[in-house]
Image (spheres, grey):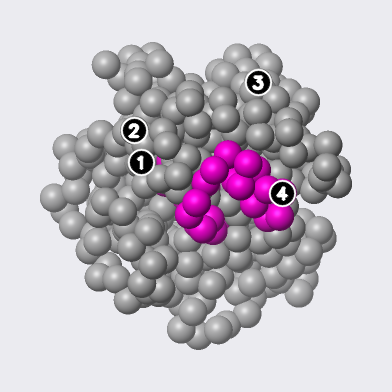
Amino acid sequence: MENQKYTKELNVAVRVVHMACFLCEKVQKQLISTNSDQVKSKDDDSLVTVADWSVQATVSWMLSEAFGAENISIVAEEDVQTLSKSESSAILAMVVTAVNECLAEAPRFGLQRPDKALTTSQILNAISQCNSTGGPLGQHWVLDPVDGTLGFVRGDQYAVALAMIDNGEVVLGVLGCPNYPVKDDGLNRKSQQNLRVSEISSAEVGSVMYTTKGSGKSWMQPLIHRDMMFEWPNSAKLIRVSSVDDPALATFCEPVEKTNSDHSFTAGVANTVGLRKKPLRVYSMVKYAAIARGEAEIYMRFARSGYKEKIWDHAAGVLLVQEAGGMVTDAGGRPLDFSRGIYLEGLDRGIIACSGFKLHEKLIGAVYASWESSNL
Ligand SMILES: [Mg+2]
């Protein structure tokens, strides 16, 4: 059974993430074909694109329409600082177009479109409304409009991640992965053959995964906008973690970029545990999706010291893995704490997601053994 308490929230969240995937795909195509000036650097030098702001505005608007702007709290990655600067006027105009084009298609996703196109100030307002800092009490939506912006810009993997935290616990998770092949072993197949995403037939690519806490079920469905037959929830199917528990046969994922995780440390842990396969390096929360779908068994992530993990980079993915039968903890074996604001405070060293208990136990042990000799 689904968790009945969040039926309406899940219904809206799944549809909104489908819409966001539709928006992202359109922007990504334009970005790659025109090489236009749609990418900006934020003050911390990370990338942000038309899609990040447009998705945040769209999701914020749709959630406000469904639940009432005064009733909802949204914690999300983007703000309007860069977008409001005078040199960003061209990009702001692109955001306004992208949002309105997407909202106009809302009925295709089973949602209501606005009576008339949103104005620039309504859109900026929708983005800046997502300024909640979460916390231990009440319900908070958590959004990463585009997770893995570098993957997005490169035409590779990225994700739209929407979750809800209720009294400090993640209770609902939706992950849209527009470039993740829907067929079994899609990620491995792609990396082994070194296919570009654009070389795989578009009907085979793209999925939205979702779950609610305590349901014991995670689901996947193809992108609604590809085919009218994919109406939610009829076309969804259950996903489950892998049953492989022999390290020699296990596949492990890690971030592509060394700045996000120490590759040599994970290589040491992998060696201690007896993992034989080369790591599968994937952008974004698609790594959690790969564990939940049983395409990989392990996701390890050890950020440099001083880096604080943010809740929007993990909430949806963690719940998907857990409800599909997997385990996610910090490197000390403790659950991740989503109740303390925008950061995963108190995180012990790193994050380990696993398909099952046996592999998880071995990894935790290997981290202890390797930690002393590392310099993270
Ligand atoms: Mg992001």
Mark 1–mark 4 Cα distance, whole angstroms, equals 24 Å
Residue 261 picture location, percent across and down:
69, 51
Q: Which mark is residue 265?
A: 4
Mark 3: which amino acid? Arg
Q: Which residue is mark 3?
A: 334
Relative vertical location of residue 135 with respect to residue 179 in this rendering, above or below: above
Q: Secondary structure at mark 3?
A: loop
Q: CA distance from mark 4 to mark 3?
A: 20 Å
Report the quarter where the C terminus lies: top right
Query: Label 1, on which residue?
Result: 294
The residue lying furthest to the left in this view is 229
Q: Earlier in the sequence, mark 4 or mark 3?
A: 4
Identify the magenta region. 263-291
How packed mark 3 is, by other alpha carbons closer than 10 Å (few <14, some 14-19, many 20 or more), is few
238 horizontally vs 119: left or right = left
**In 3D space, how far apart are the residues under numbered discs 3 and 2 (Cα atoms)?**
22 Å
- Is the C-beta separation of discs 1 and 2 under 8 Å? yes
Q: Earlier in the sequence, mark 1 or mark 2?
A: 2
Q: Earlier in the sequence, mark 1 or mark 3?
A: 1
Q: Residue at x 50, y 31 (%)?
A: 359
Residue under label 2: 243
Give residue 360's position: percent from left, percent from top.
54, 29
In the foreground, 266 or 5: 266
Mark 4 or mark 3, whichever is nearer to me: 4
Give the percent coordinates (x, y) of residue 244.
37, 36
Label 2, residues with CA under 10 Å away: few <14, some 14-19, many ≥20: few
* Res 319 visible: no
Closer to the eye: label 1 or 4: 4
- Sooner in the amino-acid sequence: mark 3 or mark 2: 2
